[in-house]
Image (cartoon, grey):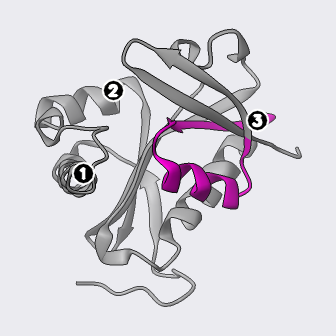
Amino acid sequence: MTTLNETGSNLVIKRANADYVGILQELYVVAARWRVARGINLWSEHTFTKEYIENFMQEKEVFVALAGQTGIGCFSIQWNDKPIWQELDNEESGYLHRLVVSRTYSGMRMGHKLLEWAEQYVRREGKRFFRLDCMTENTGLNQYYKEAGFVFQKTVVGEGWSANLYEKQLML
C-alpha cells in the first residue's frame, strides 16, 4: 500500500475512465457498508455494480484520487442539479456529488484535499459557486461541510428524504 505524507504530496486526482471502474466500485461499496454499519442508510452497496459505475462515468464528470494504484477517494462534478437545487439551480455553479474517501486514509484530511481540488476545478471552469448537498439527518457530515467553509442555503424535501444545500462563493 502506498502511504501519503502529511501534505498528501503523493496524491494524484484525475478524471476517471474505464481503467478505474474496479477502484471506484470498491470505494463506493466499502463506503456504503461503512455508512450502513453506522446507521446512515444513504447508499446500498448493491447499487454500485460495474454497469452502474460505467453509466455514472458517462453521465457525470467522475474523478478518482490515487496514491500509486491505490484508490484514496472519488467524487463527481456536474454543471446542473435541478432535481435537488430546484429554483436555485443555475449555470454559474458546479455541483459536487458522491464524495468518498477510503477509511484507510481517515484522519489525514483527504476529504478536505478532495474538496479543495474540486473547488479549484469548478473555479477554473469559470463558475461563481461551488455547491453540494447532504442528507439532513447526517449531522456529522453537515458539520463537516460547515467546517470546510460551506454555507447552508436551505433544506429541500423529497419523497422519503430531505437534504441540506450548501455552497461556497468563488472568487474568480
Q: Nearer the viewer, mark 2 or mark 3?
A: 3
Whether residue 146 is in magenta: the answer is yes
Estimate the spatial distance between the alpha carbons at disc 2 and disc 3, rounded to whole Å.
Answer: 24 Å
Estimate the spatial distance between the alpha carbons at disc 2 and disc 1, rounded to whole Å.
Answer: 13 Å
The span picked out in magenta is 128-151
Residue type at tag 3: Phe
Disc 3 marks which residue? 129
Q: What is the x, y in percent for residue 40? A: 31, 46
Vertical position of residue 47 compared to residue 99: above or below: above
User: Would you say residue 126 is visible in this rendering?
Assistant: no
| Residue at the image point whose x is 48% and y is 90% from the top | 5
Disc 1 marks which residue? 20
Vertical position of residue 171 compared to residue 113: above or below: above
- Of 34 and 9, nearer the camera is 34
Disc 2 marks which residue? 58
Compared across the picture, whether 154 is left or right of 132 comes to right
Total number of numbered labels? Answer: 3
| Residue at the image point whose x is 43% and y is 47% from the top | 75
Residue 4: give its label: none
| Residue at the image point whose x is 45% and y is 67% from the top | 12
Vertical position of residue 39 compared to residue 156: above or below: below
Compared across the picture, whether 6 is left or right of 19 comes to right
Residue type at tag 1: Tyr
Q: What is the x, y in percent for residue 163? A: 52, 29
**Secondary structure at numbered mark 3:** strand
**Secondary structure at numbered mark 1:** helix
Q: What is the x, y in percent for residue 64? A: 38, 54
Question: Which numbered disc flags the more N-terminal residue, 3 or 1?
Answer: 1
Mark 1 closeness class: few <14, some 14–19, many ≥20 residues within 10 Å: some
